[in-house]
Each structure stands twice: as C-alpha cells, then as structure tokens.
Image (cartoon, coloured by chain):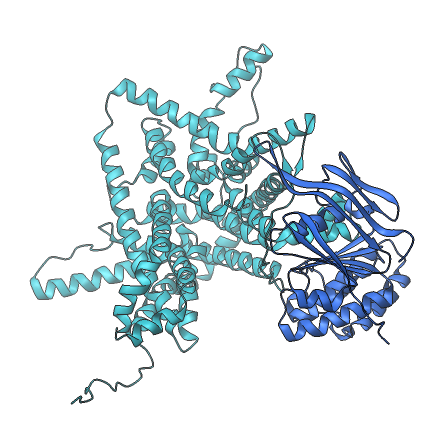
Amino acid sequence: MHATPILQINDIRLGYKQDRQMKVVVDGYTMQVPAGEIVCLLGPSGCGKTTVLRAIAGFEPVYAGQILLDGQVIAEPGRMVEPEHRRIGMMFQDYALFPHLTIEQNVAFGLRRQPQQVRRQRVDELLELVRLSDLRDRYPHELSGGQQQRIALVRSLAPSPKLLLLDEAFSNLDTEIRRQLVVEVRSILKYSGISAILVTHNMEEAEAIADHIGMMKDGKLQAWRRMDKTPTQ
Amino acid sequence: MVTPSSAALTATRRWPPSQWIAAALALCVLAPVLVLTALALSGETGHWLNLLHNVLPVSLSNTVLLLLGVGILSALIGGGSAWLTTAYLFPTRRLVTWGLLLPLAVPTYIMAFAYLDVLHPLGPIQTLIRDLLGYDSPRQFRLPDLRSMAGAIMLLGLVLYPYVYLSVRVMFMTQAASLLEAARTLGCSRREAFWRVVVPLARPAMAVGLSLVLLETLNDVGASEFLGIQTMTISIYTTWITRSNLQGAAQIAIVMLAVVTLLIYMERHARRRQRYAITQRMHPIQPVQLRGIAAVVAMLLGWFPIITGFIIPFWFLVNESIKRLSSLQAVSMELLRATYNTISVSLAATVVTICCGLIIAWSARHARSSTARLLARCSSLGYAIPGTVLATGLLIPYSWFDQLISGVMNALAGIPPQLYIMGSAAGIVCAYTLRFMAISVGSIESGLARIPPSLEQASRSLGHTAFRSFLRVHFPLLRPALGAAALLIFVDAMKELSATLLLRPLNFETLSTWLYAEAARGTYDEGAIAALIIVFAGLIPVILLARTQLKANY
C-alpha cells in the first residue's frame, strides 16, 4: 500500500438542521483512500453513503472530525474549502450535463482558465478516449443514456482532479450497457491514474470496478474488503 | 348457444363525432381572426393611409414601449425574486416565497384604480411624505405624475411579474441544484456559476413567463385608459365605440395580431433546442444562510414586490370599502345586480368551456390522425388574442347569427326580430369560452396524459363502451384537473374587462365594467367594493397555486 493516502477521513459527523435540531446522518466515520485506487461504498439507500460523498465534494458541512486531501485539511467544523478549490471531480447520478451547452462546451467547461490551444487539445483527447468525437456539436438531450454517461465522465476528468467521486453513476443504465461501461470506466481511471470513490447499492457493479469495498449501514462503515484484482493487460 | 351480435362489426369511422365537434370549435376560434382579416382588407386604402399616418405611429410606439418596459421590469423582479428565494436563507423567506404570488390576484385595471388614489397628490402617501419633509401644500412638493408611460410600466410590472417568478422558480427547483454543483466541482465560484449556468438555464422558463406577461400587457385596456396611455388596445376601443368605425378597428386589430404572432415566435425561438430532461432525483439548491446586513437587504428585496403589488392596493380597497359600507349601511341594488351578473356569466362560461375542453382533449387523445391534435392547438389560440381584438372580430359573426335566428323564428313562429346574442349575455359567454379554452384544453390534456392507456383498454375489454369507460374511469380520475381548470376559468372570467366592455348588452354591468365606468367618470363610489370582490375571488387560485407549485420548497 502507498505511504500517504490521497484522501483521509477522520471521525467525521454529518447531518442537517431541521427545526433548529441537529439530525445526525453519519457519525464517527473514518476512511482512507490509497492513491490511485478505486474505493466503492456499498450499502442500502439511506445509509449515508451519498452524504459522505457530498461532504468530500464540499456540499455538506462537517460537524466533527476532519477531511484531508493529499495531507491538507479541506473540511473541519466551521471551516471548509469551497468545492471549486478542492480539485475533486464529481459524476452525478443524473449526469448533470448542462442542457444549454453542446457536448464540446460541456467537456471544456472546467478548462476555462487554460489557453485555448491546450483546451482544444484536451477536449479532443478526452472525446477520443470515449470514442464520441463525432458527437461534439450535439446537445446532451440528443445523446443516449450511455453516451451521456461517458461525456459526464470525461467532463469530470477534464480538469485533472486529484480524486473523482461517482454518485450512483451507473444506476440509470440498462444492465448490459452498465456491465460494459463499468469495465470501460475502470480502465480509463486506471489509465489516468486517478483515485476514485464510487457509491452504489449494486454488489456486482462494486466487485467489477473497485479495489476496495466499504460496506455501509446506518451511517457507519461496517466492513472493509480488499479486492484481489490481477492487473489488466 | 351464443350468436354473434349483429352490432359486433362496425365500420371504423375516420372522423368520430367528437372530432367533428372539435373541428367546429376550432373554427369558432379562428372565425374572428378570419373576419378581422376580411374586414381590414375590405377597407379603403384611404383608411390604411389614415391608420399609417395618424394612429399607428403613436399607438404602436406606445404599445412597443409599454411591452418593452413591462417585460424588462417583470423579468428583473420575477427572475430576481425566484433566485433570491431558492438560493438564500433569510428571515421570513417561506412567507416571501408564498407572498410573491399574491399580486396575481390583482388585475391590472384594479392596480391602476387603486394607485391613482393612493398616490394622488392629496392621497395618503404623498401627504405622509410632505409631513415628513415639512411641506404643507402639494404645490411645494409632489411626486411625478402616475399618468405617464413610466407609471404604467411600473404598475403593470408590479402585478404581472409573478408569471416569470413562477416559471423560473420551478425551473430552479427542478433543474438547477445538480447542475450548479457540477459547475462548482469543475472549478466555478458561486458567482461564476450563477452567470455561466443559472442565467442561461433560466432563459427558456423566462421566455415562457415573459410571453404571458406581454400577452397580458397587450390585453390590458383598463390600466392604460385610467393612466392615459394611448395603446393599440385603446385605439381599437375608441375607433369602434366613439367613431363606430369597425373597419378601422379591424385594421388596428390586425396589426395587433401581428404583434402577438411576433411575441409567440420570439418565445418559441428562445426555447428552441432546449428540451430539458427532468432529472430523476430532484433536490433543491442548498441555500446560503444570510446574516446581518445581507439578510436585511434580502428581506427588503423580497418584501418590496409583495407590499407594492398586493398589500398596498389590497389595504386601500379594504379601507375604502369599510368607509363606504359604514356610511351607507347597505350596498346599492346596482352593485348587487352587477355581482349577480358577474357570477352567473362566469359560471356559464366555466361550464361551457370545460365541456368543450373535454371534447377537444378527448378527441385529440384518441385521434389516429394528427388533424385532431392540430385542432386542439387551434382551439387554444384564443388565449393569445387580446380581448378587445377577439370582441371586435366577434361583432360581425354575432350579428349574422342574430339575423339568421331572427329570420328563422320570424318565419316559424312569427316572433318579431330581436338580438338573441348581442342583446343577451350569451355573446360574453361565447367570448369567454373562446378566450379561456386554452386553460381547459391544456389542463384536461395533461390530466388525461397521466392516465395510462391500459386503464381504458382494461375497461373496454371488460365490456364497457368508450363513452361508459370515460364516465366510469377517466372522469373520476380527471376530477382534480377539472376542478383546478374550472376555478381558473371562473376567476379569469370574473376579472375579464376588455372583451366584456365591447360585447355586453345595454345596461348590463359586470363588476369589472362597473368599476371601469366609475373610474372613467372619476367618481369613486362603490368601485372599491367591486374591486375587492374581484381580488378576493382572485386569491383562491393563487392559494391553490401556492400549494401545488411551491410544494418542493421546504
């Protein structure tokens, strides 16, 4: 195992306030993600796995404990790094492709600060990676579910995040396409060397993609399993 | 032994009866437009030149200016308040979210009626300002006159913005959250995400809301009249009523229809290629908690449209009504009759419109051809035709109809000729039906769309005829949609002024025409009571709307 984990979660508490009362969703949660590896959080709906993911992305405040990315604190009680400064990518269950932008503009969205030459090259390369270059001028609603999913993936990879979060990213797809894509996404992630956390309730999907599987229940990590994968190719 | 029934085999008819009725109704909506076109074209070229030189330059430019001003103002207020109430937490936010719909209950002419008095140089607000500043005569200090283009834009914008608010807010609630978060993970700050994602995303919803605002602005006759703005609607009205020049009125009406067509085209254009998918897992935007000065500013911004667009006129009407009632002890017979007229005409229009809507929507659902769907679209066009234009176009078909019936009745029963439609409220009921058909067809169609075809197939396979299936299955399931549509139509009919003014028989007053006459005469007797009744009726659908449309908000 690598010396420093890319992500370190220490004893965090998450929840929300309702009618001035704190509702705790996740408590005393600790987890590490080794650099370059894929972790899968598996559990029934309502177990808090999506809340953990949203806290890592920066959409939920932390009420106790700490989250460290690459050894730096990104969230602790009363203090958090804004999502846009974390360099953490996220893939949403509904893909969240911008309906008013073309595929190309969607993929280029996170590359705005790069010079145009670099930006174009990166978009070309990413579209090539998922073999969708000829759809670059289409709008999201003109694509199939599997195509939208691939675009959402490369869009989140475009700014070269340190960590990618996938929230039920495959659950809207048919079983057949899902099997294909899970394999494809794993190889793309491994190829780019990006660490990832995937949230799902599908065991088969988890086993196919993950290096580590964390079983969650009632806001707690119940078990941690290391998958034995022979390296592809 | 079972013998096959002789009725078992019936020819598949291409056009079932419901479709014939739908076609006839669509023709009724198109008739006024066709008549207007024919009338306008039959006019002498001299008339057209007169129109071009004397009428259009003023009234067209006034109308365009009014549309532009009201459009910008309601986009700012509606879009701004939609964002304010979805993206920020501030004290009384829930109340503001709901209250922002209230101005919908105040028709434009009642807004003008109330504010002319509230902002009168000797009225409460100007007196208060003078007292605060230490002046004692209107000659020393007065606010700019409300009877101006700026005044009209302000008043119309303040009651029409909720159309924009509603559609944009629904858009934010259903679409914005995950897209906003996606933008953040891709390196956008809150401000950048607002400009790069939220604003372009709001555009189609904005277009929908704005088109309704602008159609209402075109439709308005009362406010422009009270405020002295010579719009095209006013020109049509005066050309016909005071100069009895129907051709001239028709010519202006045609130009107005061109403006309407342009508006609808612009709406379609703004929405092109933007078919947004509905996301499966909707979660509202995580609002930012505002504190200190920012919270106070947000609260003031949120309350401003509610106070100016509803609370002030409402408070004024209640106040005036109480004053009136306590000095008189009773309301006049005329007001009671106007109330009775309003309710009976509106009820009749509601029943007729709902029945027609059922037929049209049903035939569109079951049609094998696209004709029926086209007919449904045609019959919904009435909402876009300003009331004054519709009424002008109906005058001639009405008189043909009266002549026809008179002739028949005279020949058959020897009854002397009389005005069957023009002389009774039937003409108003017909006009309301044509104008509000879109509400009825639209809500029934969407209600039917939620009923899976398998239910009807099950009923048919269990031995019910198509009609019986409708009565036993669809009608009960449609009841909530029908109820909501009926309520909306009833209230819209109660408020209607522009078509009613032109089509009502002699000595027939509704609450709105009563109010109009009083305000036009400058006598403020019982107008406030009439206005208050209309506003109270208007509040009912607003409450209903608030409960259904804003539910996603917690």
- Residue A171 can be seen, yes or no: yes
Q: With respect to residue B485, does B528 lie above or below?
A: above
Where B476 sits versus A173, above or below? Answer: above
Specify the farthest residue to the left.
B413
The blue-tinted chain is A
Residue B371 appears at what percent x and percent y? Answer: 41, 75
Q: Quadrant of residue A159?
A: bottom right
Instruction: From this view, report whether residue B188 is shown above or below residue B517.
Output: below
In-image side of A9 versus A116 (left or right): left
State the cyan chain: B
Question: Which residue lies most toward the right here?
Answer: A3
Q: Nearer the viewer, residue B344 or B86?
A: B86
User: What is the quadrant of the C terminus of chain A in the image?
Assistant: bottom right
Q: Is residue A105 visible?
A: no
Instruction: Decide which of B97, B156 is in the foreground and name it.
Output: B97
The location of residue A224, given as percent across then percent down, is 75, 56
Image position, residue A89 (x, y; %) = 78, 55
- Image quarter in which the N terminus of chain A is found: bottom right
Residue B90: image location, x then y, percent: 62, 32
Give the camera-side residue of A210 and B254: A210
Instruction: Classify residue B471 as left or right of residue B29.
Output: left
Q: Nearer the viewer, residue B442 or B447?
A: B447
Q: What residue is at 41 percent from the left and 78 percent from the top?
A: B369
- B97 sits to left or right of A232: left
Q: Residue at x 40, y 45 (%)?
A: B238
